[in-house]
Image: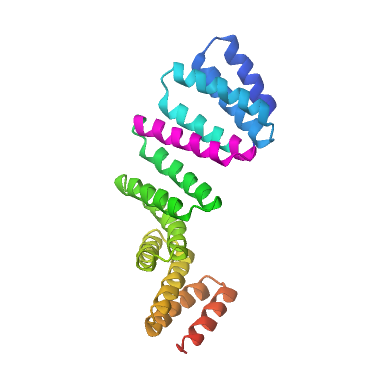
Amino acid sequence: MKVDLLRALERLDEMRGIDSDEGVANALFEVAVGYLQRQSWEAAAEALDETLHLCVKLDNLPGQGQVRLRLADLALGQQEPAQALEHLAAAEECFQWAGDLSGQASTLERRARLLEQTGDLDGAAAALERALGLAGKVDDRLSQLLLNQYLAPLLRRLGRVEEAYDSYRRLGALSQELNEPQREALALVGVATLLAQRGENHEAARALSGAEEIFNRLGLPRQAARVVAERRRLGGG
C-alpha cells in the first residue's frame, strides 16, 4: 500500500511535539517508506538513519531489523547490491537476537533473491534452505510452501536433481494440504520434468496426467493443453 506521505509527515510533527521517541520512530519509519516508494533516496536515507538511531536507543531489535531491511531496499534502489547484502546480514542478526524466527526467514528469502540476481545460485539455495529450516521450526506451512516453490526450480538449475525432486514433492504435498491446486499442478509438472530427466517417462506421464486434470478443473485449458503436449511427447498418450 502506498504511504500517504503528507499525512505521515504530519504525524511525525505530532510525535515530535509530544516528545515520544517510540512515536517518532514509528512515524519516521512510515515517512522513510513513503520516500522509498517515491525513489527519493536522499530523504529516505535521512529518515532511516534517524529511525535506526532511535531503535538502538530504545533497544528495539525487531525495529532495527525492519529498518535494516528498508536500508537494503535503499541500497538496491541506488544500485549497490553489496551494501544491500550487508544490511540484510545485519537485519538477520537483529532478528536472531530478538528470537524472531519469521523475521529471520523473511530476511533470508530476500537475501536469496538478491544473491540469485547477482549470479550466486549456490548462495541463494543455501539461504532458502536455512529459511525453510526456520519455517519448519515454527510449523509455518504457508512459508514452507512458498519457499519450496522458489527453491525447487533453483535446485534444478544447479543440477541438484534429487534435491529438486524432493522439493517439488514437498511443494505438491503442501499445496494439497493448503488447498492450492494450481501450485499442486505446477509441482506435478516439476516432478514430471525431473522424472523424465531420469528416464522414467511412464511415471512422468502419470504426474502430467494429474497436472492436466487439475488445470482442466480450474478452467485453465491453455495450461492443460501444454501438459497434454508434453505427455504425448513422452509417449504417455
Asked if the stretch drawn in magenta spans residue 95, the answer is yes
- Whole-percent x, y for residue 171 in the image: 40, 62
Q: Where is residue 220 in the image (x, y as percent from the top left)?
A: 57, 72
Q: Can residue 3 be seen in this view?
A: no
Residue plotted at (44% across, 50% down): 123
In-image side of 61 versus 77 (left or right) = left
Which quarter of the rendering shows the N terminus?
Answer: top right
Nearer-the-camera pick, 80 or 218: 80
Query: Residue sitting at 39 percent across and 68 percent down?
Result: 161
Q: Nearer the viewer, residue 224 or 147?
A: 147
Q: In the rendered view, tell whether residue 200 sits above or below residue 217.
A: below
Q: In this rendering, is residue 28 above or below 118?
A: above
Structure colour scheme: rainbow
Whether residue 201 is visible? yes
Is residue 45 on the magenta stretch? Answer: no
- Residue at horizontal 47 percent and vertical 49 percent from the top: 112
Nearest the eye: 120 or 214: 120
Magenta segment boundaries in residue numbering: 74-97
Give whichever of 174, 71 is nearer the camera.
71
Give residue 75's quadrant in the image: top right
Q: Quadrant of residue 105?
A: top left
Q: Could you tell me residue 79's position as x and y percent?
A: 63, 40
